[in-house]
Image (tube, rainbow, N blue to C red):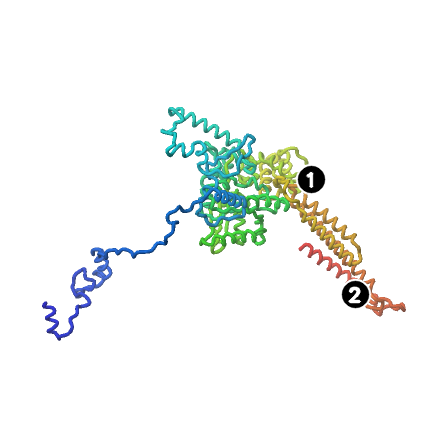
Amino acid sequence: MGKKSQGLKKAGRKAAHLPAFQRGSSSTNPDRKLPDNKKKGFYRSKSTIKLLNLYKSKPQQGKEPQPTAPARIQPDRRWFGNTRVIDQSKLSLFREALSQADNNPYSVVLKRSKLPLSLLAPSAPGRTEHFDEGGQEMSTVPQTRGSAILSLQSFSDTFGDKRTRKRPQLQASDLGELARQAERRQASFQEGRGGAGGEDEGDETAFSRDDPRGQDSGGETAAASEKIFKKGTSRRIWGELYKVIDSSDVIVQVVDARDPLGTRCFRVEKYLRSHKQSKHMILVLNKIDLIPSQVARIWVRRFSKELPTLPFQAKKQEKAAGRLQLFQLLRQYVQLMSDRKHVSVGFIGYPNVGKSSIINALRSKQVCRAAPIPGETRVWQYVALTKRLYLIDCPGIVPASASISDSLRVIRGVVRPERIACPEEHIDEVLQRVQEESIRARYSLPDACKWTDSESFLAVLAKKKGKLLKGGEPDISTAARIVLYDLQRGRLPYYVPPPVDPNAPEEESGDENKGKKRDRENREDEEDGEGGDEGEEGDEEEENGEEESAGPPGKKESSAANAMKRRRQTEAAEAEKDVSEKKKAKTAEAAPGKKTPTGTQTPGPSGKRGTRKAGEKKKTQGMKVVSEADLAKTLVDEFEA
């Protein structure tokens, strides 16, 4: 028996127990007693001592791992067979279904299947297309990756017991011959790429498919006459575009309704189809108030066959046309992507097409800097529309192309007119696109003013505006900048007419509405006992007014507004005439001896007149005239409203 236990038994014969805390004064003891007259802050705290002891201690050896309990496996032959095997018949069915889904622009892929879609979908980069002698495509079946290699040499000829190749097949005997073969292939490749191109690619067919910046094969960007015409093609701007594309789930491409094909980025669309197939794209036709409604319908019908297309007018933030439709479409994408916490929507397009204005219209307040000049947005910007929906504003991008002239860049709003050295060089293209009537109406030029070319026109305009140099010479450059400003901001109306589609259905809704309106007015005239002659005359005037307001392509908005004003005045005059005739008819049909609406009394059968005086009678007649004038004014206000 130890000394400690003997001492416990002698102390009172109680049960032995060990102290709960160690009373030693060692520096490794967290419960030690500090010496007298020592502050606690000078020594280590309990937590510090425990942490140091943890570092010094050795890891505790755990128990040996025990084997798992025996489990029963279901006896099934599928454990020993192949998985995810598909035959050619099912593969053809999948290929047909996938082709139908690809052709539908409103189909949305939410989740990728585990099926081998690489056997169904065409290869992204490097796809080879086969054409016959006439230039028509031979087969619509998508070519899979590696099909070009297999057409040259099959697997059986390369691998397996029956292979015929024993050593690598070298096409050249030395390095010089290999270099000459590479040059010949490069030359043939450039010739083939120069003649290829689709109808919708516009002026961008001479550049690489995989590079959305539109660089040529040599890697050099198409040179422009001035440095200002390279705006929108820098690496910084395209870096911002790549950021927006990578961060967005849905991409909205905004185009100008006046020139949709000219402001549409086909290279970016091809890049998204080949490399970013998970991104959903929407096409927004902005500035539809600058073109006729019929032309806007044709463009929407044409583009809807390829992508979901919406018309939009971001003129006023409170009354933006198409705002509700675009917001509902974005909400549908948010509901379809329910597994994601946030859905980002990126807005891309040419400069000055209205990307920031659309975001401001959706947000109903000024959240992005917007101006009627290109290059206002310089970096990408996040804007929260809802808790799950975010909008991303992107700077304007311009694919570099040598076939696009500088005048087209100016007309499309890529370049600011005040930074152009010679703006008068681009007025010829403006005079070809804008009608002479619209120019005369805009600048109040009389018919006596004639011009033969752009210089004479600018001289006439400079004298009209008072832009003169020393000696009374007209300032042609300033006048040219005024014209370019008005063209870019929509004050000079112009638009590119859509291509004629013979299969498009004819619009008959306008004629049907006219016929229904004519029948309704005829019935109202018959009920009033006046016949249908006046109603037909009013309809003829209305049709003439509509024909005047429609006008040929490029007619100014002021002429249409004047025609609408004349139409309203005609309708107001007819309404005033109808009111006066109804009043007269009611006065004539009033019974003898009864009071008329004017307050006077009609003569009875006995020839007696009323008891009122002549002065009172004249006074009441004057009151009647004033009331009819007020009524006519009210009708005019209602028509104008």
Kindly tell me whether residue 379 is visible in this rendering.
no
Q: Mark 2: which amino acid?
A: Pro
Which circle, 2 or 1, is nearer the viewer? 2
Which quadrant, please, contains the N terminus?
bottom left
Q: Which residue is mark 1?
A: 446
Q: Check the image and report above or below for 134 versus 383.
A: above
Helix or strand or loop: what does disc 1 sit on? loop
Q: Is residue 468 rendered to the left or right of residue 187?
A: right
Q: Which residue is mark 2?
A: 597
Query: Which residue corresponds to the image point at 45% horizontal and 26% vertical from the top-left?
Result: 184
* Label ID, residue 614: none
Q: Mark 1: which amino acid?
A: Pro
Whole-percent x, y for residue 38 in the image: 19, 64
Whole-percent x, y for residue 58 in the image: 20, 55
Query: Which residue corresponds to the image point at 69% horizontal and 57% vertical from the top-left?
Result: 638
Q: Check the image and report above or below for 370 versus 169.
A: below
Tell which of 445 and 260 is nearer to you: 260
Residue sitting at the far bottom: 12
Kindly tell me whether residue 326 is visible in this rendering.
yes
Whole-percent x, y for residue 625 in the image: 77, 60
Tell which of 297 and 408 is nearer to you: 297
Q: Is residue 240 rendered to the left or right of residue 516?
A: left
Query: Which residue corresponds to the image point at 38% horizontal and 49% vertical from the top-left?
Result: 77
